[in-house]
Image: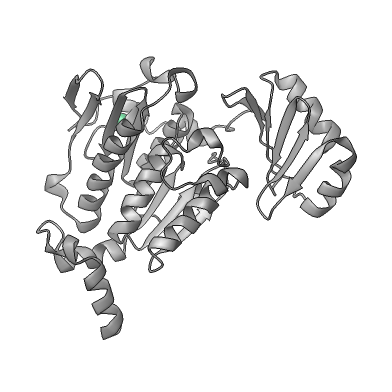
Amino acid sequence: MNDSSANARDERYSRQILFRGIGADGQRKLAAGRVAIVGCGATGSALAGLLARAGVGMLRIIDRDYVEPSNLQRQSLFDENDAAESLPKAIAAARKIAAFNSHIVVEPKVEDLVPANIEALLEGMSLILDGTDNFETRYLINDYAVDRSLPWIYSAAVGSYAVTLNILPGQTACLACIFPDSPRGLVETCETSGILNSVVNLVASIAATEALKFLVGDAPQLRRTLLSFDVWTNEHAEISAAKPRAGCRACGQRDFIHLAGEGRPHITLCGRNSVQIHERQRPIDFTEMDRRLQSHGVVRHNDFVLKFWHDPYEMTLFPDGRAIIKGTTDTAVARSLYARFVGS
Ligand SMILES: [Zn+2]
């Protein structure tokens, strides 16, 4: 780095460099940091925004979804134009970050994290952050992270409640140590229980701070507990996660069933009255598809998504053939719509 760009960096991050936990040396370490954020909804947006502003040099943002108006209450990287365009969240996030910090690298990945692509999506990362909304993906991340001795930070929020845990494989408890199976209370989702934007920002702030401690190498300060709080009732709890649980399937027996799994079934419910079709072997030519669908309903596309309205259904198609079909929770209906309009 030459003198003038080093000066510009020092000026931008001056208040953070003044903080004794970071300093000039810590700021250089942040610039060398490579962090994956899996899921860029509310928690992922807040995590990505904080780490981008803090100067973490490289962020890989992985998300399978597109922006909708109901996201804007809490997903801080998106605006009304993103929702009007149905932009994929990873793309919208990368654009927004580029507008306030063009000095870092953001790699948007519009993909669903599954066993088949997890290596390609997470390789080369020094830390993985959880912005997902489901335990299936979290167990997959946990298996991968434990297998590769890669640290990750679990974060979850629903209603007014949030919980977070640092996982340092080989040192602390992993997700499967604490929750051998999906915890019941957190199976409810934002779709069923709603969510406050404030609890998201709180859990993301705590997780992002832990990420900074990790990246600057301040291991003694890393929290070694499962921390939970409810911002509405003011209840909070902390339980020790300082040691792995003997006999844990993942970090004890190293039985990585989620990593070895086939991944999601071909078709899944994804909440909010919609079904996702996880097609991946069907690259779509949007211009051609747009022309073909014109006589069947309203259709429009940009570089990233094609939207097709065929009353009462709304299909969002991604370039790799994946689709989210809104207006039904019946997988058979979704499958037949996909077969009819995209291909079988
Ligand atoms: Zn474990």
Asked if residue 137 is positioned above or below residue 292 in the image, the reply reads above
State the residue lying farthest toward the top: 184
Q: Nearer the viewer, residue 260 or 191?
A: 191
Asked if residue 171 is positioned above or below residue 12 in the image, the reply reads above
Q: Position of residue 55 (x, y in %)?
A: 30, 62
Q: Taking the image as drawn, is residue 33 in sight?
A: yes
Q: Where is residue 309 in the image (x, y as percent from the top left)?
A: 76, 34
Q: Position of residue 235 (x, y in %)?
A: 19, 19
189 relative to 287 in the view: left or right: left
Report which quarter residue 245 is drawn in: top left
Q: Which of 278 and 43 is in front in this view?
A: 43
Q: Residue at x 42, y 57 (%)?
A: 97
Q: Where the N terminus falls, by quadrant?
A: bottom left
Report which quarter residue 227 is drawn in: top left
State the residue lying farthest toward the right: 295
43 relative to 244 in the view: left or right: right
Asked if residue 172 is positioned above or below residue 101 in the image, the reply reads above
State the residue lying farthest toward the front: 80
